[in-house]
Amino acid sequence: LPVTEMRLRAASFGLTRSCSNKAFLSVYQRRYQAASFQSVTHCDLCFLGCFITRLHLITTDPVRATVVTRPELLNVFSQEGLPETAVPESIGTPESPKWVSVCGQPYPRDAWFNVPPRIISLSERRLHNQKYHPLCLIKQRIVDFMYKRHPRREVGGQPSKPLFSLHDTLSPVVTTRQNFDSLLIPPDHPSRALTDTYYVNQSTLLRSHTSAHQLDLIRSGLDAFLLAGDVYRRDEIDSLHYPVFHQLEGVRLFTSEELFRDAIDPSRCLRLFEDISPSSVYAQKCKHPFQALPSSMLPSEKQPQHTNETAKRLEFELKTVLQALAKSLFGKTCQLRWVDAYFPFTHPSWELEVKTKVGYNTDDEVEEWTELLGCGLMRQELLERAGLSNKVGYAFGLGLERWAMQLYHIPDIRLFWTEDSGFLHQFETNDIHAPITYKPVSVFPQCTLDLSFWLPNSLPIRVTTSETDTETSQEDISKSLERDFHDLVRSVAGDIIEQVRLVDKFTDPRTARQSHCYRLVYRDQHRTLTTSEVRVIHDRIASQAVEQFGVQIR
């Protein structure tokens, strides 16, 4: 077999593409061509078979999310000379496949799996790295600002490589440890729920924030880095929200000498940390490596470990650079404000808001404050777990879509996913600082239809973050259905769905059954939709809601 294909096959056993040809050949000979396959476990064979199946199928349709079914797997095993007995009966059938391919890699799926095929297909787009795309332009502008503001200087005073390193190609598939545990997000936090996060299986998910890579990058030895990538959340549908969006994260760590570098301190009184009494509640160590007191239980002005000088200096460093970044992009006259916020992995925490009309519905007549980013001082417990107890730091994360909408006057978040040349052509420039104002290709009318249904008395048993509860209240059913219904609408209607709003709830006093009325707003970015064609899509949504959720259309 060609070495290229051997590389791909060996990668399914965990080897990286940077390994030598000799290493790949060794793996191939030892594990794939083993005599009678005695040294290869059934699990390895199934995984390898799924990987090969992906290679076969991706040649015909490289974009689609490949779900590996049992017939496909058996066919590939036969072609490759692999023993079909290695495919257990439990491996997926066309009705209930047990393997799914995400970002070109196969993963086992279980009862936690809740990722629609459309969401998986979007993971292949990587808009933030697509040349001339507005998200790529805004990313480059932010990175350029950070590079120029923070050059690393050598002994001779000459600027060297930038202080911040950039990482923008990391896979969005992460573990629950990376996405939640490593950031001190408690087990009962709402963000862990199936209603909020896209799970591939119980221990694997599509990252809901770029912070999922924070601890790994710090442990690798980095003390200042930028991280950009696509993130996934089961969110509402409107002009500002989309289930896939893009974040840019920044982290900077300081030693005492670096933080107080400009301070006049002849007696060396300035220090990073307080002396905490062993009897203090803040001195108690949690048994679990990724547990700590919630930020809500800490003093509001600072972390107990930090001195007042440390907290104030870090806050100054953080807010100064972010305000300068916003004004460099949006102009010195833009109105900004800081709002106190809460994040499990930073304290104190803030959000930066800008006054704008961009991104709101056309019937909005007044300016509103729009969140641009969240930030804060890194929890000291995270740095201690990374082996950096002598450093402090800050972290921030911003939504690239929000910044691009503000900078380029893009009114709807769906436009970032269009492949219409009329949109993309407007951003074709080699000067990332060129002033660009988005000009609508055309404006077409909305088509609005309502859909009302009775909720079922119960739902199919779903896995929760704690334990399975077969006794489900109407409120639980309502909350679970709301996110599932949004996903269903997106899967059926695609990007012609502009808004989905729950406009009415009614509870029958006699039966205690609950009814929901959703208002669905359809609009195509490229042509006028007729009521008849929208009705076909609307009816399909209704019929699938009945089939999937057991609702009763009113």
Image (cartoon, grey):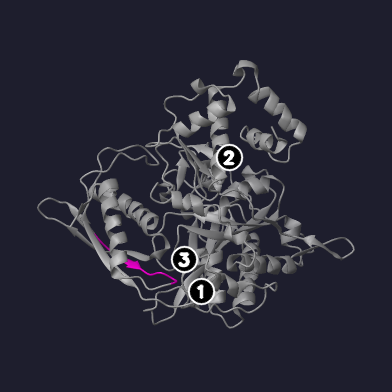
Q: Residues within 10 Å of mark 1 (few under 14, many from 20)?
A: many
Which numbered dot is residue 55? 2
Residue 474 coordinates in the image, percent (x, y): 23, 49
Query: Is disc 1 placed on a helix, strand or loop?
Result: loop
Q: Residue at 49% of width from left, 43% of height from top?
A: 66
Amino acid bearing label 2 = Leu
Query: Does the segment drawn in magenta span residue 522?
Result: yes
Occupied quadrant, residue 110:
top left
Residue 125 coordinates in the image, percent (x, y): 56, 56
The magenta span reads 517-526
- Mark 2 vs mark 1, CA separation in Å: 38 Å
Amino acid bearing label 1 = Ile
Q: Quadrant of the C terminus?
A: bottom left
Q: Are marks 1 and 3 in contact (CB under 8 Å)?
A: no
The residue that label 3 is drawn on is: 414
The total of numbered circles placed on residues is 3
- Mark 1 vs mark 3, CA separation in Å: 10 Å
Amino acid bearing label 3 = Arg
Residue 284 visible? no
- Mark 2 vs mark 3, CA separation in Å: 31 Å
The residue that label 1 is drawn on is: 410
The kind of secondary structure the magenta stretch mainly shows is strand
